[in-house]
Amino acid sequence: MTSGFSRLGLPFAVKRTGVRRRWFTLIEIIIASTIFLLIAVALFSYSSETSRSWSKIVVERNRFKELLTLDRALDTILRHAVPFVWTDRETELNPEVPFIVATGDVLRCAYLHRLNNPDEGAIRFVELSVRDNNLVATYSDRPFLYWGEVAEREWSSILATDVSAVSFRYADWHADASDVWPARLFWRDEWETVESERTDLPLAIMVTVHWQDGRVESWLRRSMGNGYRERYGRWEAVDEDR
């Protein structure tokens, strides 16, 4: 019982209700703060890992799209590559010169293309090489023996970026009459045509692309009409002693 005063100034008794205020202790505050920090750290770690995983997914997706684009382009060119002979008017006898330049780092050839415009024809002429750290395909709808004369009839397409180098290898046959496939097949770093008077194409072409980040990818495609028992165009087996 405690004493008090009424509105009239008379004393009256006030009874305690038993309600007691309770304050958090320091230990409880420390425990709650620790739990909150642990949850925050866990959420931050999870979000960071999710962000890194998503970034990796985006990078791999972009690489896959680039590889897919490059794969389609190489597949279209190499699988449909055909022998093509053109006349060199700068010589007196006008000899027929094969339209192919196949070295270790440059490939220029003709290939069959879908007929979109009758004026352009169904044959494309293309050169694959590295320019300014890009793997570039330079196209033309006309056969130019001297590529610098293409002028306005040339257009380019970037097949891959951040490329340090590209290399080509060319499959050929020995003159050995053996039916054993490994004994007849061998690889060349260059495809000689003018010196050997050959007008045919390699059996297959291997393209290896080296990226600046260290990645290396290879593509192997058989040229059109070239198989184990067939050849597209005139061809004679190479003499082993040559």
Image (cartoon, rainbow, N blue to C red):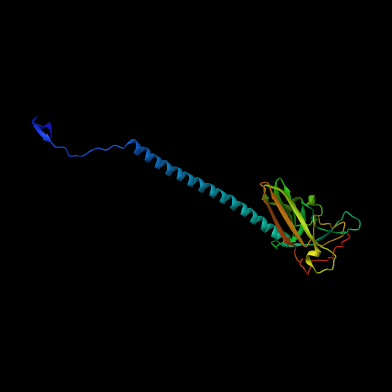
Front-most of residues 101 and 61: 61
Front-most of residues 133 and 179: 179
Which quarter of the picture shows residue 77?
bottom right
Residue 33: image x %, image y %?
39, 39
Front-most of residues 204 and 121: 204
Which quarter of the picture shows residue 13?
top left
In which quadrant will I find the N terminus? top left
- Say which residue appears at 32% left-offset and 36% top-offset: 25
- Say which residue appears at 68% left-offset and 57% top-offset: 73
How many numbered callouts?
Answer: 0
Front-most of residues 104 and 240: 240
Q: Furthest-top residue in view?
A: 9
Looking at the image, residue 85 sits to the left or right of residue 56; the answer is: right
Residue 188: image x %, image y %?
80, 57
Residue 112 visible = no
Residue 241: image x %, image y %?
89, 60
Residue 118: image x %, image y %?
72, 62
Q: Furthest-right residue in view?
A: 92
Q: Furthest-front residue in view?
A: 27
In which quadrant will I find the C terminus? bottom right
Residue 168 visible = yes
